[in-house]
Image: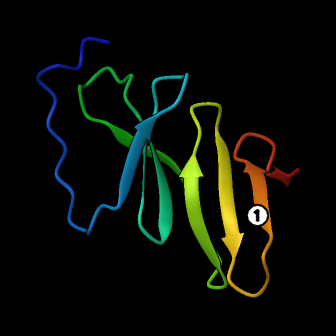
Amino acid sequence: MNNKDKKIALIFMLMYCTFNLKGEFIIYSKIIWIYSTKTKNNKWECKRFYRIPEDYELISISKYDKVYLASNENDYIYEWSINTNKSV
C-alpha cells in the first residue's frame, strides 16, 4: 500500500485497530468503524459501522472480517461475519 504519508485524526478513545485483506482500516471502541483506504482524493472514508450490543464485549476482529464477541450474560463466544451479517 502507498499510504505511508497518510494521517488519521481520531477523536475518540481507540481500543483496537487492524487491517483486513481488502486493505480496509478497522477500528473499534463500542462501535466498529470500517474505513476505505483506497480513495482518489487521499482521504479515507467510513464505509460502514456497527454498534456492539450492550451485553457483549468484543474480543477481536480477524483479517477475514470475522468478529468474535463474548456474552456478558453467559459463557458463550460468538463468531459473526461482517460480510454476510450472520453468526456462525
The residue depicted at 55 percent of the width and 22 percent of the height is 21
The residue depicted at 54 percent of the width and 22 percent of the height is 22
- Counting from the top left corner in percent of width and height, residue 72 is at 68, 83
Q: Horizontal placement of 6 versus 59: left or right?
A: left
Q: Horizontal placement of 69 versus 24: left or right?
A: right
| SS of the residue under disc 1 | strand
Label 1: how many Cα within 10 Å (few below 14, some 14–19, many 20+)? some
Using the rendered image of the protein, determine whether residue 76 is visible from the camera's viewpoint. yes
Q: Quadrant of the N terminus?
A: top left
- Counting from the top left corner in percent of width and height, residue 66 is at 68, 43
The residue depicted at 37 percent of the width and 41 percent of the height is 45
Residue type indicated by callout 1: Ile
Q: Which residue lies furthest to the front in this view?
A: 75
Q: Is residue 44 above or below residue 17?
A: above
Label 1, on which residue? 77
Q: Is residue 66 above or below residue 50?
A: above
- Counting from the top left corner in percent of width and height, residue 69 is at 67, 63
Using the rendered image of the protein, determine whether residue 51 is visible from the camera's viewpoint. no
